Every structure is written in structure tokens, then in C-alpha cells.
Amino acid sequence: MSLTIPNLISLTRMGLTPFFILAVLEHKPERALAIFAIAGVTDALDGLIARYFDQRSSLGAYLDPIADKLLLTAGFVVLAIPNTHEGILIPLWITVLVLARDLAILGTVLVLQFTVSIKPFSPMGLSKVNTAMQITAVILVLISGLTNSVDALAVATLYLVAGLTVLSGLVYIQLTKKVLAEHQREKT
């Protein structure tokens, strides 16, 4: 396992998460937004460096999505708690939906990998769109702490996230069924 520059950048992004949470809890939406933006830049930067300088690694394949999910999960959770920040609240049911889908996918991947030795499948395009909408929703909720002019857009984006979360979850179920069926055919 090599600790490449992209891996160090992913670890830095993980390290930003507590500072993001503190900024939200201290009612500092500008700081929270800045930290979230810096984390976004580091996400793009680690991928760019990994590809351009051929520094892809198996460790990075795990660290990058973990860093992303850690920050997004923190954002959805802390921005769903009443009186923790300025601006609109992320509805608790949307936070639970997002977290439940991610945990279900993680659990399924682990079970498939350890019980039938099926390698984890790559993220689908729909999941990438869902993640982009989740990021957009967190940004809009943070901005709503600075101005109420984005409140309607933030709410609409949150409902879009809910729909995409359900849809991508259903697609993952179909993909899992297909992978298991192919595995069964290969065994016979």
C-alpha cells in the first residue's frame, strides 16, 4: 500500500470534516461553506493528480469515496438537526433515506465480497448524479444561512435528492440481482 499524493489529499479531506461540523455548529455559514468548497476542490485535485501523474492506487480507490461520504454524511446529519445552524433544515426523513441507501449498498457490497467473492461494482452514472445533487443540496442549505433567496431552490434540490436516492437504490437492487444471477450461472 503506497501513500501517494492523491491519498494524502483524500486524508486531508477527511480531516476537514470535523472543522466543517464545528463551523456549522458555531453558526458560521461562511466558514462552513468555505471548508466544504475546499473539500470539493481537493476531491477534484486528488483525482486529477492520480490520473495525470499515474498515481492511482488500491488504497486511493477506498480513501476517495470514504472521504466524500464522510463529508456528505456529516453535512446531511448536522444540517438536519434543529437549531444547529442558520438557514433551512434538511428534513430528517431525507437524511435517513440518504444514509440508509448508502449503508444498504455498503452492506450489500461487503456481503457479496466476503460470502461469494464478488468484487464491488463501480458507481453507476445515476449514483454520480445523485452525489452531485447531494453536494449541491448541502451547498444551497449552507447558502440559505446567508440569504433566504435560495431557500426554494434548496428545498427543490433536497426533494430531487430524495427521488434520486430512491431511484438509484432501486437500480442497485436490480444490478445486485443481475450480478448474483451471473455468479450462479458461472458456478453451474
Image (spheres, rainbow, N blue to C red):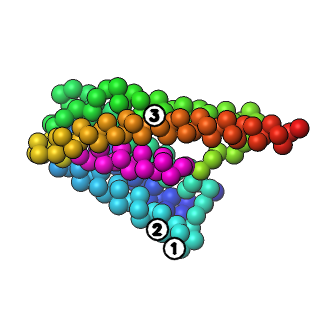
Residue at figure coordinates x 74%, y 33% from the top left: 115
**Residue 161 left/right relative to 172:** left
Residue holding disc 1: 52
Say which label, 3 or 2, has the lower sequence index: 2
Q: Amino acid at mark 3?
A: Val
Q: Amino acid at mark 2?
A: Leu
Instruction: Please name whichever residue, 163 or 122, is drawn nearer the observer in this view of the structure.
Output: 163
Q: Secondary structure at mark 3?
A: helix
Is residue 6 something one can see in this rendering?
yes
Task: Report how far apart the C-alphas of labels 2 and 1 lie in the structure.
Answer: 6 Å
The percent position of residue 19, horizontal first and vertical second, equals: 29, 45
The percent position of residue 113, horizontal first and vertical second, equals: 70, 39
* Disc 3 versus disc 1: nearer the observer: 3
Magenta span main SS = helix
Q: Amino acid at mark 1?
A: Tyr
Say which label, 3 or 1, has the lower sequence index: 1
Residue at figure coordinates x 54%, y 31% from the top left: 104
Q: Secondary structure at mark 2?
A: helix
Residue holding disc 3: 166
- The image quadrant where one finds the N terminus is bottom right
Residue holding disc 2: 48
Bounds of the magenta segment: 123-140
- The image quadrant where one finds the C terminus is top right
Residue 77 location, quadrant = top left
The percent position of residue 142, horizontal first and vertical second, equals: 21, 44
